[in-house]
Image (tube, rainbow, N blue to C red):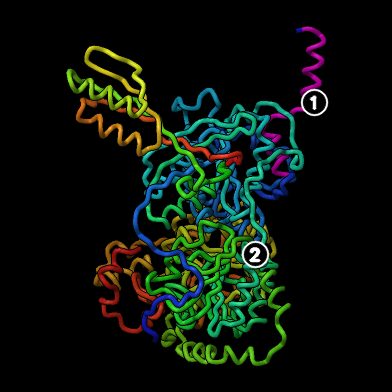
């Protein structure tokens, strides 16, 4: 009997790069009761992680909602998630935003800082650089509103941490395609 | 109320109907002939509407799980959608096993469950449960019907979803007050169903490439599955023509038996854990694998990193999520197995220039297959007067093969012996629980098959343990004059558990012996059926003939040798070339890594 040998395939086989990557999926669904739990249930039942999630009705006429999920895994796992999501009856399309060149992503965060003295000034200065708005100010605290891509929000939070960061609230990632074309 | 509005209301009652009637109208329009069900508080309006109709037959089962399996048997043997009607709460939860079974085996079903009235939902009302939540993961799709107005449209959509794409079970949860609420009927053509299931047409470039690969393959093998059966009888015909035209050997999964006729020279037998030596070796040694409607299940592949290492793989599947799920493939062809087989056949015939040298190309391959066949891997020791389970199935096959016969099975050793020793020539003749492995599937499934084919011979090849899981359904068979035959291979063990304990756990038979089995003959009589028992080879044929000839439900207690094992066997965690071939068992057949696998 023949010994084990490597695949002799001359066709491109999905390369098994097992490194983990983060993926932003935009899922266009029929806006009907239970559709969110179907999507979330499918992802969690198969042991995939959800790092952020946003959902709202986006096209009243067509009755569709857009769910944006940030998840992670090996490329083959992410392909599986996409294919599995595509099987759900209310799912119309699944777009892998992180694979698209012409996509925009934005997130909004509310960041609370409690500090005094020099740290307060530094916080205000950093907020200025990030174009964050102060929504609420007291003698001992700020609440900033900051928008941007995930990395920008992460960077802002990291910078605020030594300056008295106490609480963060984030919307999760929103996404849309550039140009005239629609998803 | 003014006279004018009163007249209007009267007029409205003439054209509108209660939800229960709308449901039955929709079922009728969808061609439903028979419903398998069990009444209860939350579906009484539907049963009331059913009372006045003679267009739809209802078969009263004894347990909701049985109702779903019966509908599966009906669906699998006819290619139509099976319909189940059960009540809320326990009715719905009892149906869950059957729904999960149908999902894994891609069986089209519509399961209608009652629900408490809309104002009571969420109040922990009597017989309330979150049916939609519970069945979300074990249906292809499910609906909570929130108004009678939407009921006809959703019913048509439910059938559309169940039947199209990769088939599967769909559940409709209908609150009791919706069953009373009045609305207008919407016909199938007028219903604005979402175009939610789209099956892509074959891509001609891919078809050409596949045929090119087939033409150059030295060692091709067709590996077919339940998808061919689901694609309809024409798909099986096209498969046969394509296999004959290409001269390649063909093997099949458990679910695909019957698509290609056993006994044809190209047929290698079933593959996988208990498949034939030639089928598994052909899979391992091939240079081109054409998977048709099969999903590379772990029972088929064995150890993945040693699975068919030298082959290029073409995967024909209707479900894009099956592609590259377990095994990376070179050429995926997504679409209906029947359409793609037809396209491949047409392309093959277009290119085939009748070159006799073409057959020569495969001659070396057939030489190897001949050598593997010579191992005669399904052989067993036939000596003695006791009935070996394999022998019983061989005799059952010989005595029934010229009849219009349908076979169902339970799950376990008897199922594997049935797959090995009963030979199927046509699709839709073999009903078994492949994916979920549901003990207790076979007996209720026979009722569905018999209801669809009243004059056929319908036999459940059963084990003594499995059959007791849904034994009560024999009562439904008696009530509805369904003369099904329950052929029990009785070894007094949970046979497959015992076999694994022998191979994996040093022969420590922990709770796998069924002491105090019922007297199956008396049990048959108690239910109003007929019982037979055979203990020796001499009496077996005569008793089987008696069973065939009696027009009543039968329980046949076939007492077989107790400690027979199913061979050949690819132990879990092993590769295709690593088969156990029977004979003495040493107890160290399975590696530690393999022991953790199911």
Residue at the (57%, 91%) spot, across then down: B363
Vertical placement of B489 versus B286: above or below? Answer: above
Q: Chain of mark 2?
A: B
- Where is mark 1, residue-wise? B14
Spatial CA distance of label 1 from label 2 is 47 Å
In the picture shown, does residue A96 fall above or below B122?
below
Q: Please provide the residue range marked out in magenta.
A: B2-28
Residue A128, image quadrant: top left
Q: Quadrant of the C terminus of chain A?
A: top right
In magenta segment, residue B15: yes
Give the secondary structure at mark 2.
loop
Query: Which residue position holds label 2?
Result: B551
Q: Which of B163/B289 is in front? A: B289
Specify the principal SS of the magenta part.
helix
Kindly state the secondary structure of the residue where label 1 is placed.
helix
Q: Position of residue B236 (x, y in %)?
A: 66, 70
| Labelled pair 1, 2 in contact (Cβ < 8 Å) | no
Q: Chain of mark 1?
A: B
Please tell me which of labels 1 and 2 falls first in the chain.
1
**Quadrant into which the N terminus of chain A falls:** bottom left
Question: Residue A79 in magenta?
Answer: no
Is B62 above or below relative to B146? below
């Amino acid at each position: 009997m023949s010994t084990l040998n490597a695949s002799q395939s001359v066709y491109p086989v999905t390369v098994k790069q097992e490194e983990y990557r983060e993926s932003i999926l935009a899922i266009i669904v029929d806006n009907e009761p239970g559709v969110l739990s179907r999507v979330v249930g499918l992802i969690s039942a198969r042991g995939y992680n959800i790092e952020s999630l946003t959902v709202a009705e986006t096209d009243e006429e067509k009755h569709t909602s857009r769910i944006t999920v940030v998840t992670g895994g090996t490329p083959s796992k992410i392909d599986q998630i996409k294919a599995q999501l595509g099987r759900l009856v209310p799912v119309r399309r699944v777009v892998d935003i992180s694979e698209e060149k012409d996509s925009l992503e934005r997130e909004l965060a509310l960041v609370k800082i409690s500090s005094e003295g020099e740290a307060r000034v530094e916080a205000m200065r950093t907020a200025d650089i990030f174009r964050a708005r102060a929504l609420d100010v007291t003698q001992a605290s700020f609440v900033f509103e900051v928008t941007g891509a995930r990395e920008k929000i992460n960077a802002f939070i990291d910078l605020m941490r030594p300056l008295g960061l106490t609480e963060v609230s984030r919307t999760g990632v929103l996404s849309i395609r550039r140009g005239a074309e629609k998803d | 109320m003014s006279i004018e509005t009163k007249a209007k209301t009267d007029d409205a009652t003439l054209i509108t109907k209660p939800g229960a009637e709308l449901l039955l109208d929709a079922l009728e329009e969808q061609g439903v002939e028979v419903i398998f069900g069990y009444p209860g508080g939350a579906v009484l309006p539907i049963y009331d509407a059913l009372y006045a109709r003679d267009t739809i037959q209802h078969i009263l089962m004894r347990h909701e799980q049985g109702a779903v399996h019966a509908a599966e048997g009906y669906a699998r043997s006819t290619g139509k959608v099976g319909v189940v009607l059960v009540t809320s709460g326990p009715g719905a939860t009892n149906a869950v096993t059957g729904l999960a079974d149908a999902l894994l085996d891609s069986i089209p079903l519509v399961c209608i469950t009652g629900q408490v009235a809309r104002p009571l939902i969420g109040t922990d009302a009597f017989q309330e449960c979150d049916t939609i939540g519970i069945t979300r993961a074990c249906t292809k799709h499910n609906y909570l019907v929130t108004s009678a107005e939407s009921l006809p449209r959703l019913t048509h959509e439910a059938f559309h979803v169940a039947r199209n794409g990769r088939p599967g079970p769909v559940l409709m949860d209908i609150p009791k007050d919706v069953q009373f609420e009045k609305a207008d009927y919407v016909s199938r053509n007028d219903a604005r169903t979402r175009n939610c299931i789209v099956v892509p047409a074959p891509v001609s470039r891919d078809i050409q490439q596949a045929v090119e690969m087939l033409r150059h393959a030295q060692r091709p093998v067709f590996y077919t599955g339940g998808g061919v059966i689901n694609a309809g009888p024409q798909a099986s015909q096209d498969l046969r023509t394509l296999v004959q035209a290409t001269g390649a050997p063909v093997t099949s999964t458990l679910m695909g038996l019957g698509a290609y006729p056993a006994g044809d020279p190209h047929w290698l037998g079933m593959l996988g854990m208990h498949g034939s030596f030639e089928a598994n070796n052909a899979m391992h040694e091939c240079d081109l694998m054409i998977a048709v409607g099969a999903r590379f299940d772990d029972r088929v592949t064995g150890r993945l990193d040693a699975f068919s290492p030298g082959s290029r793989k073409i995967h024909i599947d209707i479900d894009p999520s099956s592609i590259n799920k377990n095994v990376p493939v070179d050429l995926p062809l997504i679409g209906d197995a029947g359409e793609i087989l037809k396209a491949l056949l047409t392309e093959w015939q277009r290119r085939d220039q009748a070159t006799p040298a073409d057959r020569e190309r495969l001659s070396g391959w057939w030489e190897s297959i001949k050598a593997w066949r010579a191992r005669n891997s399904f052989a067993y020791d036939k000596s003695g007067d006791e009935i070996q389970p394999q022998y019983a199935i061989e005799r059952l096959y010989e005595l029934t093969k010229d009849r219009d016969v349908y076979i169902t099975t339970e799950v376990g050793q008897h199922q594997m012996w049935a797959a090995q020793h009963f030979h199927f020539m046509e699709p839709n003749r073999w009903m078994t629980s492949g994916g979920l492995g549901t003990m207790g599937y076979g007996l209720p499934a026979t009722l569905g098959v018999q209801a669809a084919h009243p004059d056929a011979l319908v036999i459940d090849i059963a084990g003594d343990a499995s059959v007791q899981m849904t034994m009560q359904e024999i009562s439904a068979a008696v009530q509805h004059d369904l003369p099904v035959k329950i052929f029990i291979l009785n070894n007094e063990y949970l046979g497959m558990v015992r076999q694994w304990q022998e191979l994996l756990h040093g022969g420590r038979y922990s709770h796998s012996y069924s002491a105090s089995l019922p007297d199956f003959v008396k049990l048959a009589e108690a239910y109003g059926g007929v019982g037979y028992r055979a203990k020796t080879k001499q009496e077996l044929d005569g008793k089987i003939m008696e069973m065939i000839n009696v027009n009543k439900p039968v329980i046949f207690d076939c007492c077989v040798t107790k400690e027979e094992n199913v061979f050949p066997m690819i132990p879990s965690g092993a590769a295709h070339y690593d088969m156990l071939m029977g004979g003495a068992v040493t107890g160290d057949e399975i590696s530690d890594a393999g022991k953790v696998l199911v």
